[in-house]
Image: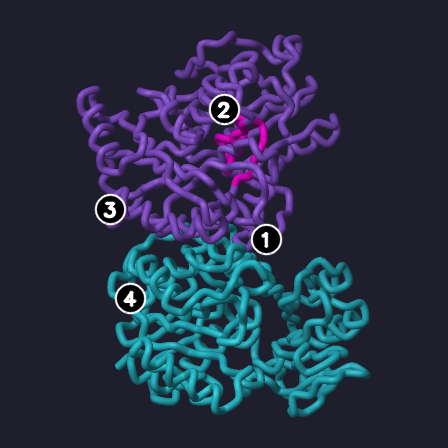
Chain colours: A cyan, B purple
Amino acid sequence: MLKTPYLLFLGDAHDALAAKVAQGIVDWRPENAVGQLRLDGCKADLGIPDMTIAEAMEKGAGTLVVGVANRGGFIADNWIALLTEALEAGMDVAAGLHNKLADVPQLAETAARTGRSLFDVRHPTESYPVGSGAKRPGKRVLPVGTDCSCGKMYTALAMEKEMRARGWNADFRATGQTGILITGAGVSIDAVISDFISGAVETLAPANDPDHWDLVEGQGSLYHPAYAGVTLGLIHGAQADALVLCHEPTRTHVRALPDYPVPDMQDVMDMVLPHARLTNPDAKFVGVAVNTHNLDQAEAEAFLKDTEQRFGLPTVDPLRTGVGRIVDALV
Amino acid sequence: MLKTPYLLFLGDAHDALAAKVAQGIVDWRPENAVGQLRLDGCKADLGIPDMTIAEAMEKGAGTLVVGVANRGGFIADNWIALLTEALEAGMDVAAGLHNKLADVPQLAETAARTGRSLFDVRHPTESYPVGSGAKRPGKRVLPVGTDCSCGKMYTALAMEKEMRARGWNADFRATGQTGILITGAGVSIDAVISDFISGAVETLAPANDPDHWDLVEGQGSLYHPAYAGVTLGLIHGAQADALVLCHEPTRTHVRALPDYPVPDMQDVMDMVLPHARLTNPDAKFVGVAVNTHNLDQAEAEAFLKDTEQRFGLPTVDPLRTGVGRIVDALV
């Protein structure tokens, strides 16, 4: 668990999209964001107070979170002095980049000397058991997608927010670096040794009260030839009671692979369900979440309506319509 | 690649089964086994000459292979002196155990000083790319199972042997520690980071001549809730032209999980085929390989005959009948 609240470091982000991790924290856990720290030339602005490290310490910041990805996703040389200063001032530092904070000698040395922690959330340090497949109490939702990056994290976070607003007992369970930084905990499941995928998910979303809901963040797609193994281990480990299909309707091929078309939504449901029922015979699809960002309002409404008629399942865009109708379907 | 030939170290194996890795080398790569080295009390005997390290060096041994697993699969304290002696004498040392040779300080120090290599084949040291899904030339066979440990490695090795005897251009591709030690190369696929499962298999069985056959070792089962993610990544990475279903007919539940029955063979074929066809639309089942070890001769013959009639596919026991009829079906 990361120490909250956070000072969000945006570096010299070249646009708002480069700061999407920090934006996610502000969107979903605003109480965790005491301020932003930007370098000269930073083009992103989260709309929260700019702060020095000293000011953030006064506000009680526990962790400086690197909320920016530069091109390539690596720690930039011109960040190291500030990250070192944060450690010296008494904060931990967390990042979800490709290389590790812990592999930068100056940061490792400073953390060791000051007793602070470096969190490289893309690189799990815990060991996980192999999956047991044992049925466990508590209820779980898993979004599954026709592709990578089509709204699974957003859907799970939106459902958590909706459930909590209704007074339900609900927790988002992060399986990727962005989700981990947003919520302060989780497992970067695609970085786990493959023997332990489902076991890691069993650990992440453990036995719970019968009325408790875990919203397990989905990853990849069974139709993506690079990542389907991760997706299947996640499906088995999650033992989901409720599956939500996530889809982006304007995409023509799966991420990075032009020869692999985005599958039909029905085909994905048909392929997912027998796998999900291996570890939870009661698993079923309860709704469809469409990312209509690339459609105009009329197109979006038409697509949602057509999809709802086609499958007979509540069909939403988490951003345009909210996820309330899918949560209704869980009652 | 391990340096051949090998001196096979059996330690104080408590029975023949504990030396199954060494037995596999003798069965499938007898030309690689110059001799065996046994400690007092060893209950296994491979039927090849007993040798000291000095004698094995005279016979040209390149690697001492730890061909035994003690209870727990760890390096035993009373092996370390002999493994050190092998390094000092000029051999590399290879093992497929849970802990690493490289983590034993005396072995690491000796290897560094003498310039010898330690191979921990269960722990990949290479990095692999994410899968590309790009169609590649050459032909590939993948055995898939109703469970773990039901004959997939044996089937692939037997098919390689049969193909080579017919003058075909064929290579077994090991995906587990036993197969790697037997053939001297491969990737322990369940120890790869989960993002790279299919990419590792694409690397292991790369583009080849149009008439070349790779026999890719299968792992796990889509019906095993702990390991199915590995199995699916392997299916996608292998891009198999020909699938062979492997089954052990007396088993009632999948390995280690009494609540998960062994699935019906038809269900496994139905589940595997759409996944296999994602990366190779021409994938098909060409035969069934049954491990009838626990049946008597009459029962085995009846089971093979019934299965052949049920599926209309050549059905063999690699040990009792050989795999020739499955290889015939590839012509």
Q: Nearer the viewer, mark 3 or mark 2?
A: 3
What residue would you read off at disc 4? A283
Kind of residue at badge 2 = Gly
Q: CA distance from mark 3 to mark 2?
A: 32 Å
Q: CA distance from mark 4 to mark 2?
A: 44 Å
Q: CA distance from mark 1 to mark 4?
A: 31 Å
Residues indicated by labels 1 and 2 sit on the same polypeptide chain: yes
Kind of residue at badge 3 = Pro
In which quarter of the view is residue A180 placed? bottom right
**Magenta region:** B170-188
Q: Residue at x 46, y 25 (%)?
A: B21
Kind of residue at badge 4 = Ala
In which quarter of the view is residue B293 placed? top left
The secondary structure type at the circle numbered 4 is loop
In this view of the protein, can residue B68 be seen by the observer?
no
Chain ID at mark 2:
B
x, y (%) of residue A48?
A: 65, 91
Check if mark 1's residue and mark 3's residue have beta carbons within 8 Å. Answer: no
The secondary structure type at the circle numbered 1 is loop
Q: Nearer the viewer, mark 1 or mark 3?
A: 1
What residue would you read off at disc 3? B261
